[in-house]
Image (spheres, grey):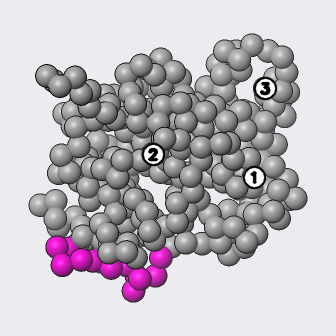
């Protein structure tokens, strides 16, 4: 541009595994409607050629990856104490990551995939959004709130003491004493994380390191516990924690339906009346899902 201004280079990273291309149709359609002009990178595993072609037609960058699940994965996880010894040894980091690509469960693996991709492309982007796909709906450009420097994580509405599952996700990898320290704190969702490139790289490196040192990966979606341990018990400088009802990400899965408000234009708003750019878990309420999907048609 003639004035020398260089627009922000934004990227959204998400992962799909073993699903048809239309599995996240609302994710792509709602994002397209916002006018978002950054890049979308989809890590795609165990998908048919037809599904991969469908993703490509969405105008996204597809990064194929391999993940071995089923009985083989169960055996590998039973051998976790062996892998943990390797992860805690002085073996070269690249060897540890190669091992992790084989033995990590899918939800832990995604953080390593994101980390390795962004390391290789750190010069290509300035701002990053790590997100789930199926249950995310965009009401505005996800970066329209101009996130400040650092990493931004988002609370849900449920305190830890009200979720035996989330306490278990802390206890399995870090022990019961760590889980006890979470009482009185509110759950943060691992499915939506914003940040600038330095902050996101540090976040992902910490997530991978904590996953390697975990006592167990028996909880297949237990990366939520890793994320919350990082956020609440081992935060690094530059992490900002956003309340659920007054921020750019509104996670409504556990919210009571009567607390979810629409404005006159039909958008879901937060407690200040502002339209939240990102809605997470919108499909947990059929009435909300129906209203939002109708806008896409």
In 3D space, how far apart are the residues under numbered discs 3 and 2 (Cα atoms)? 34 Å
Q: Which residue is mark 3?
A: 87
Which quarter of the figure has residue 56? top left
Q: Secondary structure at mark 2?
A: loop
Look at the picture and state if 243 lies above or below 190.
below
Residue 129 appearing in the image: yes
- Please tell me whether residue 74 belongs to the stretch shown in magenta: no
Mark closer to the observer (3, 1): 1
* Mark linked to residue 148: 2
Characterize the local packing of mark 2: few (<14), some (14-19) or many (20 or more) Cα atoms within 10 angstroms: few
The residue range painted magenta reads: 255-266
Mark closer to the observer (3, 2): 2
Q: Position of residue 233 (x, y in %)?
A: 75, 52
Side (left or right) of 51 relative to 225? left
Side (left or right) of 205 relative to 75? left
Residue at horizontal 86 percent and vertical 59 percent from the top: 176
Q: Position of residue 108 (x, y in %)?
A: 61, 39
Look at the picture and state if 256 lies above or below 9.
below
Look at the picture and state if 160 lies above or below 216.
below
Residue at horizontal 39 percent and vertical 86 percent from the top: 258
* Mark linked to residue 289: none
Residue 221 appearing in the image: no
Q: Position of residue 248 (x, y in %)?
A: 40, 59
Side (left or right) of 40 relative to 165? left
């Amino acid at each position: 541009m003639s004035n020398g201004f260089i627009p922000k280079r934004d990227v959204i990273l998400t992962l799909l595994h073993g699903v048809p291309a239309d599995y996240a149709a609302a994710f792509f359609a709602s994002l397209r409607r916002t006018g978002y002009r950054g890049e979308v990178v989809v890590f795609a595993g165990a998908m048919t050629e037809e599904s991969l072609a469908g993703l490509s037609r969405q105008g996204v960058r597809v990064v194929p990856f391999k993940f071995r699940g089923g009985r083989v994965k169960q055996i590998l996880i039973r051998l976790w104490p062996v892998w943990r010894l390797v992860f805690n040894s002085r073996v070269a980091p690249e060897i540890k990551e190669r091992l992790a690509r084989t033995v990590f469960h899918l939800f832990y693996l995604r953080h390593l995939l994101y980390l390795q991709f962004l390391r290789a492309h750190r010069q290509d982007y300035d701002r990053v959004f790590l997100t789930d796909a199926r249950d995310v709906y965009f009401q505005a450009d996800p970066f329209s709130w101009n996130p400040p420097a650092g990493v931004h994580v988002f609370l849900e509405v449920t305190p830890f003491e009200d979720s035996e599952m989330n306490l278990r996700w802390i206890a399995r990898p870090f022990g019961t004493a760590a889980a006890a320290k979470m009482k009185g704190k509110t759950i943060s969702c691992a499915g939506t994380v914003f940040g600038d490139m330095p902050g996101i790289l540090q976040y992902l490196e910490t997530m991978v390191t904590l996953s390697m040192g975990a006592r167990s990966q028996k909880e297949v979606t237990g990366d939520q516990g890793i994320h919350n341990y990082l956020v609440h018990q081992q935060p690094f400088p530059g992490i900002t924690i956003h309340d659920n009802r007054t921020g750019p990400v509104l996670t409504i899965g556990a919210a009571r339906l009567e607390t979810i408000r629409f404005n006159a234009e039909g958008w879901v708003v937060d407690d200040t009346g502002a339209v939240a750019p990102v809605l997470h878990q919108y499909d947990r309420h059929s009435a909300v899902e129906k209203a939002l999907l109708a806008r896409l048609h």
